[in-house]
Amino acid sequence: MKFIDETTIKVESGQGGRGIVSFRREKYIPFGGPDGGDGGDGGSVYLKASDGLNTLADFRMTRFYKAQNGQAGQGKEKTGRGGDDLYVNVPVGTSVIDIETEEVLGDLTGVGQVLLVARGGFHGLGNTRFKSSVNRAPRQSTLGSPAERRELKLELKVLADVGLLGMPNAGKSTFIRAVSQAKPKVANYPFTTLIPNLGVVSVVPHSSFVIADIPGVIEGAAEGAGLGIRFLKHVARTGLLLHLVDVIPYDGSDPVDSFKAIENELEKFSEAADNEKLDKLIEKERWLVINKTDLINAEEREEVCQKIISDLDWKGPVFQISAINKQGTKELCFAIMDYLEAQEGFKGASEKNDVEEDYEQITSGTYDVITGKVIK
């Protein structure tokens, strides 16, 4: 199934049932008085986070969701039946935005979390409600409140602890294959990764974290170049970013220029983050990871890496790895685990989901533009 991370739907609650005007008409009981019952409340529409879903693809087929209306009241002070609430299952990690007001209604980040998106109409009142000492035979009632209608934008942001940044072919997919059981497609051409991929990294027993590989970002992505920056929102919730740099890019480009180009796109994305209620990626903890060091002989390796660090004037943590050979990846994963465990609120992959495979199913594979299918 193709990975769908954004869609729009319409929701409508049930309208409240009307109250009625009715009077008791029973033999041998004069002056029976009013007995009109109230209507029933309309049903509300809720979105519920479900761990059984991993894309928003189902919403491309069904775009309108309506709860039941409340029924009208009846005589003998009988209240109308209330409309059933409607619960719509969405994947964990779904953000809900009101298209008309651009208000972020909520973030469904935990299994079973529920969000009210359309409140059911209030019931109408029957004429029994209006009787008094001076109005013993009221002939008035009220209609139920109208239904609430909304058009919503749903955005799926994958839930991960660590996000990978880097140019296409920087080795992000190779790295995630080396440290987890995820199997994203790897090939020697740009934009191999077209959708986010997740992997669970088990450092030691009962100690693991989730890492996200997103499509590569290139210069001009904010203006739509390449795949744009639409996938950067998937690393907005991460606690740590790894910026992978190809020590010897296949196209002969300068690793320092490539790093700065992505950093510039992060700044542009962060400028717009306030409007979308996203964390500013440029302000997140970021580590420099120099990849493909196996392509340089041991005598020159340190000199080349130090030149990159010096030209970037990088002050943060630096790691030298060869993802394809798994050189340095173990030490990097241990450092990541130590960092995450020191952060407040970190729970680890095992507490987010009991089964590791469930996380891998979130993206289920890589979308092949040639066949139009997902490669498992």
Image: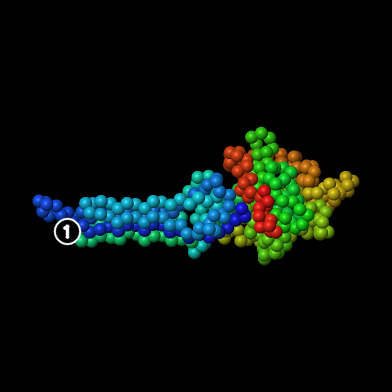
Q: Is residue 200 visible?
A: yes
Residue at x 28%, y 60% (from the top left corner): 142
Residue 353's image quarter? top right
Q: Residue furthest top?
A: 205
- Please, what secondary structure does the residue beneath circle 1 have? loop
Q: Residue furthest right?
A: 299
Q: How many numbered discs, if any?
A: 1
Q: Residue furthest bottom?
A: 223
Return the residue nearer the eye: 370 or 123. 370
In the figure, is residue 64 to the left or right of 372? left
Return the residue nearer the eye: 149 or 86. 86
In the figure, is residue 202 to the left or right of 97? right
Q: Position of residue 311 (x, y in %)?
A: 80, 55
Q: Position of residue 314 (x, y in %)?
A: 76, 51
In the depicted structure, whether residue 12 falls above or below residue 305: below
Residue at x 23%, y 51% (from the top left corner): 77
Q: Position of residue 173 (x, y in %)?
A: 72, 50
Residue at x 82%, y 59% (from the top left corner): 251
- The residue carrying mark 1 is 137
Q: Amino acid at mark 1?
A: Ala
